[in-house]
Image: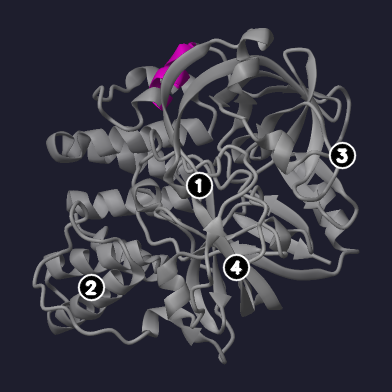
Amino acid sequence: MNKQLTAKVMCSLLCAGFLTSTLTACDSQNASSQQISAKENKTEETTSSTAFDTETIEHTRNYYSKQVHTLEKKYKEAPDNEAAAINYAEALFALGEFSEAEALVETLMKESSPDPRVLYLAAQLSYLNGEYEQAEKQYNELLDTAPDTFGQKAQSGLLMVYYQTNQYSKSQELSLEDDDPNKSLLDMMQAFGTSTPYDMDWNGKEQTSIPFTITDPLPVIPIEVNGVKMNAVIDTGGSSLVIDQDKAADLGIETLSQDTGTFAGGNTADIGLGKAESLKMGGIDITNVPVMLGPFDGFADVIPEVENIHAIIGTNVLQQFIPTMDYTTGELVLRPRDEAGKSQLEKEQKSENIAETIPFTLANTHFMFAKGAINGYSDLNMFVDSGLAAGDGAGMILPEETMNLTGIPMPELGDAVGGGMGGNDFQEASYDVDSYGLGDLQQENGRGYYFTGDTLDMFDETGFVTDALISHNYLKQYKWTIDFDAMTMTFSK
């Protein structure tokens, strides 16, 4: 039997119940010439003569590799055939080959009246690359030119743009059907009225550093929510400020909308969306803070060293800054997300030993993806989730398909232990991996983690295949800085 593992503390919040815009991931730097490109993994040719049906097929790398292989042949046989080009671009997008899809879309967008499918792809790519002003224009054009066929998708896209750019007041212009997966997010944003989210007072500080209370099994920092002191886990797998739902009443946080969240092993739980009046961290005062309310049962078992953990600092909070997760010194550094903050970062990095700077994209509300490699297979789509802690030093999660692709045998599974938002109603195991990591930043002789359920089945949330999840035990080897304007991650030692 495998060693018992610390159960997943917070595997990305997946949020499959209410955040399902069809967005996607990033295109990274070229991998080493010794690595084998996953997209070149030989597969049998499909005989389908039409574009794939995203509603009925299995969303796997193997399937979309076949589609790309077939549709590329059709496109090369008839490069002037617009339908063939669009089908090929959509398959590339689903596989995660975004630079190639973007090149095709750029050509197709030169038409005087681009096909709505092309315009939709263009808007998605703009969004993923953080080009929100361009994405807003493209979604609005799509809404004007194809309201019957792409109206809801265009409005969902605009909703995400307004979410990322803190333009909640613009959401008043939008309308989604009651059964739309983004309806609860829209309701929450509209409930903000004219209030600006994340209104910030630096109190004269140029930047701030917040020491970790602990670094392992996950980094924890002290914060205040609505004047109440508590501890918070830092987790890029979470979307925003996440609050223990049992504490919501004590904090005076009202639920503005409700839905269902999906967590580790496929477990589900009711979640709420609301607003905290204030968040204080590192001497910075932030008002009008969007919150998610979820179950925190089991956190005390996973992190017994720290009491009073009732919050999670997710990606959308970090996104208000130029943040550095400095695992080497054990602190979270926050800089203003403006020219002054960028200047501060440039000065600091001149004296750092930078290991690699890796492009990333941001899908849906908070899913950060970068390209990476496992056992020599590159071009893999890796979700960067700092909030997963597993035993045996495991630094990544793989679905069974990626394990098969990279030659990793399935280990013997045991019942999950521990807790967190994922619960423990699933099986798990760890295993050896020769090499893995983001870009060319590979770690040798590592450990991986597997758990049962719809492991990393995030297609509905991202619109592309997820090959792996990179987690805390990988990231903690570095000083990790995220630039949400340049859309790059910098890793220093």
Q: Earlier in the sequence, mark 1 or mark 4?
A: 4
Q: Which residue is mark 1?
A: 264
The answer to which of marks 3 and 1 sits earlier in the sequence is: 3
Q: Is residue 153 magenta?
A: no
Of circles 1 and 4, the one toward us is 4
Residue annotated with mark 3: 213
Q: Which residues are magenta?
A: 185-193
Q: Nearer the viewer, residue 191 or 135?
A: 191
- Rendering coords of residue 436 (x, y %): 62, 75
The residue indicated by pointer 2 is: 67
- Closer to the camera: disc 4 or disc 3? 4
Q: Which residue is located at x 55 percent, y 84 percent?
A: 376
The residue type indicated by label 2 comes to Gln
Q: Is the residue 248 above or below the residue 356 in the image?
A: above
Distance between mark 3 and mark 2 Cα atoms? 49 Å
Query: Whole-percent x and y of residue 483?
Result: 67, 51
Q: Secondary structure at mark 4?
A: loop
Separation (CA) of disc 3 from disc 1: 25 Å
Labels 2, 1: front one = 1
Q: In the rendered view, would you say 148 is above or below 12?
A: above
Q: Quadrant of the N terminus?
A: bottom right
Identify the disc placed on residue 1: 4
Name the secondary structure under disc 1.
helix
Q: Are marks 3 and 1 in contact (CB under 8 Å)?
A: no
Horizontal placement of 136 versus 36: left or right? Answer: left
Q: Earlier in the sequence, mark 2 or mark 1?
A: 2
The answer for how far apart the CA atoms under marks 4 and 2 are is: 39 Å
Q: Position of residue 328 (x, y in %)?
A: 87, 58
